[in-house]
């Protein structure tokens, strides 16, 4: 009876979308090799299965994402200095049609919580928020405006909150923020974003001439238990997502570095 109850937990990784695709690739690859004698197509399918295994199992993706998070694992908010401004990068919130604040926190919602806590600990006199946007007819509405509604509705802190408006990406955020910082005389910026995203973000704002104080949040690997059981070797949607996060940050960082070097010549 106990084995029967435990069976769904054993089968769960195989019944996920990635698990099913992985098993099908293995079966089709073996069928093509053994039955159809199609060596090229069989090896192609098995190679795809192996690629999914490497990028979607709990070993490599966790390690790779961990390399981005580890430099910031010992950062503690209470030990950080006071800054001219706290800058919350977008990605943690979405607009919702549902009241009370028309706000939906997503997987990166720790960014919002971290920024609010920084303000509660009086790390700056102003919080600047940035975000993506949604379309209301022909009008772009920034997700960040919903944060102002939340702060005011719950009276979370008394400091000023400013929205940069709808922004496309980190570089767009940095360019827009630099204009505002020039008007306000801000030099020292507490940057709040996901730990895996911090290296690229900090480099961008330092390139703009700011003194950046990183406050990383939203850890996925470092400090989060990763049990080493057998299903870690089966491709998992979350682990594939980890690999995607790492690849985006790794490639984005080096493209940024190459662009900076090119601009110096």
Image (tube, grey):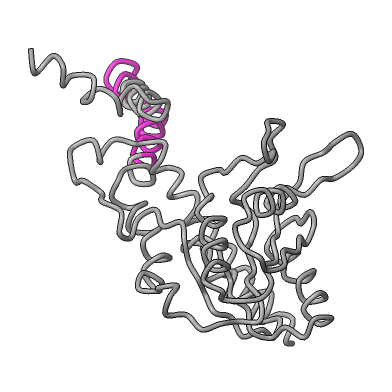
Residue 205 inside the magenta-drawn segment: no
In-front residue for pair 38/97: 97
Q: In this view, does 4 lie to the left or right of 84?
A: left
Counting from the top left corner in percent of width and height, residue 257 is at: 61, 75
The correct choice, above or below, for 234 with respect to 108 in the image is: above
- Which residue lies at the image location 79% right of the left edge and 54% below the top edge? 166
Counting from the top left corner in percent of width and height, residue 4 is at: 13, 14
Quadrant position of the C terminus in the picture: bottom right
- Which residue lies at the image location 25% right of the left edge and 49% below the top edge? 226
Q: Quadrant of residue 49?
A: top left
- Which residue lies at the image location 89% right of the left edge and 34% below the top edge? 137
Q: Which residue lies furthest to the right in this view?
A: 138
Counting from the top left corner in percent of width and height, residue 31 is at: 31, 18
In-front residue for pair 238/83: 83
Q: Is the magenta stretch mostly helix, strand or loop?
A: helix
Q: In this view, does 15 lie to the left or right of 218?
A: left
Residue 43 inside the magenta-drawn segment: yes
Counting from the top left corner in percent of width and height, residue 262 is at: 71, 80
The correct choice, above or below, for 12 with respect to 225 in the image is: above
The correct choice, above or below, for 220 with respect to 21 in the image is: below
- Which residue lies at the image location 33% right of the left edge and 40% below the top edge? 53
The correct choice, above or below, for 77 with respect to 91 in the image is: below
Quadrant position of the N terminus in the picture: top left
Magenta part of the chain: 30-52
Q: In which quarter of the image is residue 148?
A: bottom right
Q: How many marks?
A: 0
């Amino acid at each position: 009876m106990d084995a029967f109850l435990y069976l769904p937990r054993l089968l769960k990784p195989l019944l996920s979308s990635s698990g099913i695709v992985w098993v099908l690739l293995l079966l089709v690859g073996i069928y093509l090799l053994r039955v159809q004698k199609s060596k090229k197509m069989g090896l192609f399918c098995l190679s795809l299965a192996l690629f999914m295994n490497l990028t979607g199992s709990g070993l490599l993706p966790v390690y790779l994402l961990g390399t981005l998070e580890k430099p910031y694992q010992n950062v503690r908010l209470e030990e950080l200095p006071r800054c001219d401004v706290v800058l919350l990068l977008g990605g943690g919130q979405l607009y919702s049609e549902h009241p009370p604040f028309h706000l939906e926190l997503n997987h990166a919602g720790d960014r919002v919580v971290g920024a609010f806590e920084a303000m509660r600990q009086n790390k700056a006199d102003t919080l600047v928020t940035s975000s993506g946007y949604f379309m209301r007819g022909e009008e772009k509405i920034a997700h960040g405006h919903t944060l102002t509604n939340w702060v005011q509705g719950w009276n979370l802190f008394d400091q000023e909150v400013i929205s940069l408006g709808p922004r496309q990406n980190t570089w767009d955020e940095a360019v827009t923020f630099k204009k505002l910082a020039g008007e306000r005389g801000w030099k020292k910026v507490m940057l709040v974003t996901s730990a895996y995203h911090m290296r690229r973000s900090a480099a961008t704002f330092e390139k703009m001439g700011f003194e950046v104080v990183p406050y990383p949040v939203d850890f996925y690997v470092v400090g989060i238990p990763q049990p080493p059981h057998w299903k870690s070797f089966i491709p998992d949607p979350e682990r594939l997502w980890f690999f995607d996060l790492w690849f985006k940050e790794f490639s984005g960082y080096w493209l940024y570095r190459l662009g900076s070097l090119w601009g110096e010549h």
